[in-house]
């Protein structure tokens, strides 16, 4: 049997409890989103670096059979990379090349900037090379 005091008890959440929950979720989101964004940028940067290395390997294979880089061109990279990097190979002579990956779009704010790779294996970037490669 229900007494009068049982009928006066609240069921559900109060506005204060709801606002505390919303505040906790907001704080967690404010911490998690920048970390997630940084991880996504790093993943795209690693894809661009891998693309440069694939192109360098292709050029080296071409060079071993013809003793020149001239006429080699470049290898296409993964299509999803096209929205975030412009990848180009510049053959500057019969024995020299430079491959670059220039960030664009959502990746343009990346701390590493343009990634470069040449025929000697020298890697470069707009930031700390050891952290960017």
Image (cartoon, grey):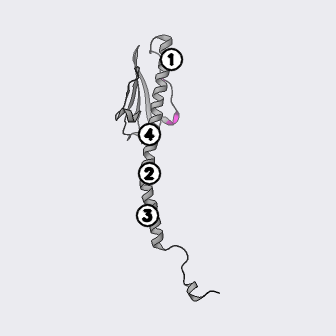
77 in the magenta segment: yes
Q: Secondary structure at mark 2?
A: helix
Q: Secondary structure at mark 1?
A: helix
For label 2, the residue is 33
| Rendered position, 122 above or below 35 | above
For label 3, the residue is 23
* Coordinates of residue 119 in the picture (x, y in percent): 41, 20
31 in the magenta segment: no
Q: Magenta residues?
A: 74-80
> Outermost residue toward the right?
1
Among the two numbered marks 1 and 4 on one chain, the one whose residue lies closer to the N terminus: 4
Q: CA distance from mark 3 to mark 4?
A: 29 Å
* Coordinates of residue 77 in the picture (x, y in percent): 50, 30
Give the position of the C terminus as an image quadrant: top left
Q: Residue at x 47, y 18 (%)?
A: 60
Q: Nearer the viewer, residue 77 or 27?
A: 27
For label 1, the residue is 61
Among the two numbered marks 1 and 3 on one chain, the one whose residue lies closer to the N terminus: 3
Q: CA distance from mark 2 to mark 3?
A: 15 Å
Q: CA distance from mark 1 to mark 3?
A: 58 Å
Left or right position of 44 against 125: right
Give neighbour class at mark 4: few <14, some 14-19, many 20+ (Cα, 10 Å): some
For label 4, the residue is 42
Q: Secondary structure at mark 4?
A: helix
Q: Nearer the viewer, residue 56 or 73?
A: 56
Q: CA distance from mark 2 to mark 4?
A: 14 Å
Q: Nearer the viewer, residue 97 or 12?
A: 12
């Amino acid at each position: 049997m229900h007494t009068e005091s049982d009928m006066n008890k609240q069921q559900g959440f109060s506005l204060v409890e709801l606002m505390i929950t919303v505040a906790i979720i907001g704080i967690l989101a404010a911490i998690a989103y920048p970390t997630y964004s940084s991880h996504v940028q790093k993943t795209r940067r690693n894809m661009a670096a891998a693309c440069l290395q694939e192109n360098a390997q292709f050029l080296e294979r071409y060079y071993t059979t013809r003793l020149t880089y001239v006429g080699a061109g470049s290898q296409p990279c993964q299509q999803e990379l096209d929205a975030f990097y412009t990848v180009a190979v510049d053959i500057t002579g019969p024995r020299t090349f430079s491959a670059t990956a220039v960030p664009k779009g959502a990746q343009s704010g990346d701390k590493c900037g343009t990634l470069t790779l040449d025929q000697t294996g020298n890697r470069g970037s707009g930031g700390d090379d050891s952290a960017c490669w």
